[in-house]
Amino acid sequence: MASSSSSSGSSSSLTSRDSWATIGSNGGTEPTNLTIRILQDITDNFSEERSLGQGAYGKVYKGVHENGEKIAVKLLHNNMQVIDDKLFKQEFTNLMMLNHENIIRLVGYCYETQHQDMEFQGKIIFGEMICKALCFEYMHKGSLQKHLYGLDWDKRYKIIKGTCEGLKYLHEGFKEPIYHLDLKPENILLDEYMMPKLADFGLSKLFGEEQTRVTQSPLGTIGYMPHEYLFKGIVSKKVDIFSLGVVMIKIITGPKGHSRSAEMPYEEFLDEVQENWRNRFQATLSSSQPLEGYCQQVNICTKIALSCMETDRHKRPTILDIIDKLNETETMIDEASSWSECMSSWMRGDLMKLEAFTKCEAIPRAKTCSEFPVMLRITGEQWRGVEEMPRAGVDVVVVVEVDWFMVRQGRMDIIKEALMIVIDKLGPNDRLSILSFEGNVPRIMKLTFMSDRGRDALKLMVNELSANHSYNIVAALQVGAEILRDGQAEEAGDSRIGCIMFVSDSSDTRIRNRYNDVITKEFPAYVFGLGEQHHPEVMKYIADMTGGTCSFVDYDLNEMRDAFELFISGLTKIAATSIKITLRAHEGVSISSIYSRGFYNRVSSDRRSGEIHVDNMYAGERKNFIAYLSVAGGNKEKLMTAGGRYRSFMAHQKLADTDVLVLRPGSACSPGKNTIHPQVAAELVRIGLWNGLLEIGRSAYELEELWVGIKRSEEGGGAAKETLLELGKDVAEIKREFAVGLPPPYFISWLNCHEWQRATTKGTRRVSGAFTVPGQHEDADAKVDNRGHD
């Protein structure tokens, strides 16, 4: 080529500097006409160093002004003159009418005819070449294709939502819809803030009111185009919706997600995506509620994407449907975040409340007391107006140890059906394992999170349970503890709560007192003795050795479901762990002893301090302890200060100090000041009955004498009538068992219940009300009400 000259197809007198200065100044409504020379200047003559990428119809370069501002210049090929002209005019026309934050903005263009002289067959001839270019706002992050790995969920969701908003603008923003027809990650560009913008409108088509047409030459990208478009040429909004589904799946799961979704069953794919994202969220989120909100958002987005890829285009959602569902997930996240903020504030307060009640209000100055009772009450704050509390995940190993002849009576089916309530009641952050035996060989399903897939797998395992020809109680406890130990090692740093749910009809009394050094107290076993065959002393031994509770229940489906639900509804309300109550005696006072039933307590050698340890407490649960003080004469009113600490789901927290005060009058007290406090009286009555039952043996006559004596005592006279009435019912049931002469399950469960001050099932929910927390009452009452309407 010897020389060249040019003339613009759309004349302009703007200089390079002036033309550039007008780009974008009018908000993108009037793109600037630029000469090819300007574009050559700002792209370093379209050098390879400035190349940003290449498509089927042109190459894109970065244009840089001398002041540092950037644009993207798309230079169309000139080797297909007719098609190029048509595509250029179509894309230019489409872009001229678009103005949306999620659509790439056209800032300039060039349509210029160049006359060139060249040598042809030994002669100099003149020819024409039309230079066509489109100039866009520069997208700093490039195409989405480069970012399908490594982004956090917030950025991925922002890209999904922005892409959908851009497509909504095309489909619904004009009287006649625009179809993109080549939606893919390469055509979604990201600005410096990761805001997505749809680009490459060369294939876009404008249609009138009739929404579906047939084209004889379908174009687009294989893998992003639906069957009806590729093979039948049917064009509709649903073509873009299909492409959107493929793009969404890749955003959510990575570049290979689309192929995996095609290879795997629908539910299995959903569960895999959910589990992968749950693991990522758990590493970054500190509260269970936003975690569940984000997991639900992932699940909904995945379901939307899969519905977009339906083979039948009529089953695909519209872009308006998709936007509505996405908006719902945002509301859900906002509510969860607000909830979390509220709960964080709430949890920074006092989750556990410590109170002290003296036996009476006053001790005369001249009087000394050697055993002055002070009741200490610790209470977990109730969970008000919130469905699920922020709590540590729970790991439960269910052990089923029943004799083979239960199968013949259909009782194994009752156990299986009742166990479904355990699977249904646990939350998504909880895990469950099923352990049974075939002979001496354990059958184990590992700890499994409660995703939809996990629940299905566990229910299948439960349905495959079978009775054994022998009992493996000690081995079961050891294997169960090992499962929990290994599981918690896997979740290092996550303060999970582990326990064994032991379901058995064993009557093998040989294990009692023979395995004290083998059975670990590392994880409590919550024991359920089944039917008339089980031996309650065996069940109590297991509970006592592990620090768990002991219940018994008949082979009745409703009663067994209630028993399991009472247990699970408490376990999923654990609000505090590692609770330590500390006592500090003041001048003239020493601590004689602490009465805490099954809970560990210690008094220092100088009797000036003491402590009580509680492993965990449910929200709304309360536990009472008695500290007996030795009080010298004098005028010191402050006897003791109680305080301590505990661990909530979020952090270690301090129990607010509580001072124990009495009046010290110089003369005899008025009768009112000497009256026993009804709360203290009630607790002393319970203690008296519990201790008495341990001492008298199983004699109905001696029990009656014990109970009459308690009611006539100072404590019995000061306790509320309701307390005596409820305990009287317990005494009557225990007397009935003593009279029969068989091993007394109600008596055994009652002792265990009062030892740990925690609800147990004693045959039926209707007689299991002691120590239940508000949530346990409501769950069970609702079930009974529902049955009444069946």
Image (spheres, rainbow, N blue to C red):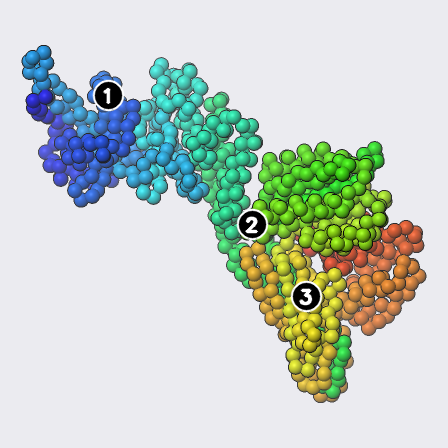
Say above or below: 144 vs 634.
above
Q: Is residue 408 visible?
A: yes
Q: Nearer the viewer, residue 537 or 564?
A: 537
Q: Is residue 161 visible?
A: no
Say above or below: 621 vs 483.
below
Query: Label 3, on which residue?
Result: 612
Residue at the (73%, 65%) spot, across then down: 596
Residue at the (38%, 35%) spot, across then down: 163
Query: Label 2, on which residue?
Result: 492
Residue 351 located left or right of residue 412: left
Quadrant of the drawing holding the C terminus: top right
Query: Label 1, on which residue?
Result: 84
Residue 244 located left or right of residue 573: left
**Horizontal and vertical percent position of residue 49:** 22, 34
Q: Amino acid at mark 2?
A: Ala
Q: Amino acid at mark 3?
A: Ile
**Horizontal and vertical percent position of residue 59:** 25, 28
Residue at the (73%, 44%) spot, across then down: 476
Q: Amino acid at mark 1?
A: Asp
Mark 1 Cα-neighbour bin, 10 Å: few <14, some 14–19, many ≥20:
some
**Horizontal and vertical percent position of residue 99:** 29, 36
Please count the marks in the image: 3
Q: Earlier in the sequence, mark 3 or mark 1?
A: 1
For marks 1 and 2, give the one nearer the viewer.
Answer: 2
Mark 3 Cα-neighbour bin, 10 Å: few <14, some 14–19, many ≥20:
some
The Cα–Cα distance between marks 3 and 1, rounded to whole angstroms, is 85 Å
Q: Which secondary structure lies at badge 2?
A: loop
